[in-house]
Amino acid sequence: MALCPSCNSEVLAGVRWCSICHSNVINPDLGHLASPGKRLGAYLLDSLVLVMGVVVFGAFVSAVGVNGSGAGMGGVLIFALLVAYVGWSLVLFAQGTTPGKKLLGMRVIREDGRTAGFWVMLIREWIGKWISGLLLSLGFLWILFDRENQGWHDKLVRTYVVC
């Protein structure tokens, strides 16, 4: 048995994360595992931005359909906001996070402790999360039962979400 460097509780040999304080046993400077609730909050923030975009776009299309004025400038503005959001998201992917995770102070790391890069995040977010949601969202619910708070999308690319 070894001791967790953060809380001094006993941990099994070969375990990466303490079951009590959720700190990394090998390198406590990596932080601790993000709770399922905090991860859900980041997901909801990411989703909220997309929903708001759809609502604004829908309101714009309805207004243009009624009177037809200002269609060109409003469309350009909405398109520019969409491009800016996608650009911001891609920059954050390169930093191992998403807009929601960034706002809540979380980041995604690989098993070896390095920040998940652009391609890892792209696969994790766009392919892995699709797989996690495929079967009644069991891949997301897996986070609640997994000892290391990993969903299927995390297991696919060997990542952890930390604070």
Image (spheres, helix red, strand yellow):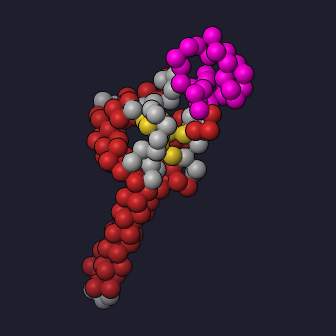
* Residue 13 counted in the magenta span: yes
Q: Is residue 121 left or right of residue 9?
A: left
Could you tell me residue 59's position as x and y percent? 37, 72
The C terminus sits in image quarter: top right
Q: Residue at x 36, y 79 (%)?
A: 77
Q: Residue at x 39, y 32 (%)?
A: 158
Residue 122, image x and y in percent?
32, 48
How many numbered badges does the structure rendering display?
0
User: Looking at the image, is 48 positioned above or below residue 70?
Assistant: above
Q: Is residue 6 above or below residue 37?
A: above
User: Quick check: can you spot residue 57?
Assistant: no
Q: Residue at x 27, y 79 (%)?
A: 65
Q: Is residue 28 left or right of residue 139?
A: right
Of 63 and 31, the residue lying toward us: 31
Q: Which span is picked out in magenta?
A: 1-27
Q: With respect to residue 142, does 124 lie above or below?
A: below
Residue found farthest to the top: 1
Residue 110: where, in percent of width, then height? 44, 37
Query: Which residue is drawn at the image coordinates 55% and 55% (left, top)?
Result: 103
Q: Position of residue 62 (x, y in %)?
A: 32, 74
Kindly give the residue lying farthest to the bottom in the view shown.
69
> For residue 151, what is the image quadrant?
top left
Which image quarter holds the N terminus?
top right
Name the residue nearer the viewer: 91 or 147.
91
Q: Is residue 113 visible?
A: yes
Main SS of the magenta part reads: loop
Where is residue 56, by image quadrant?
bottom left
Q: Work out whether residue 17 or residue 70 is closer to the camera in this orientation and state it.
A: 17
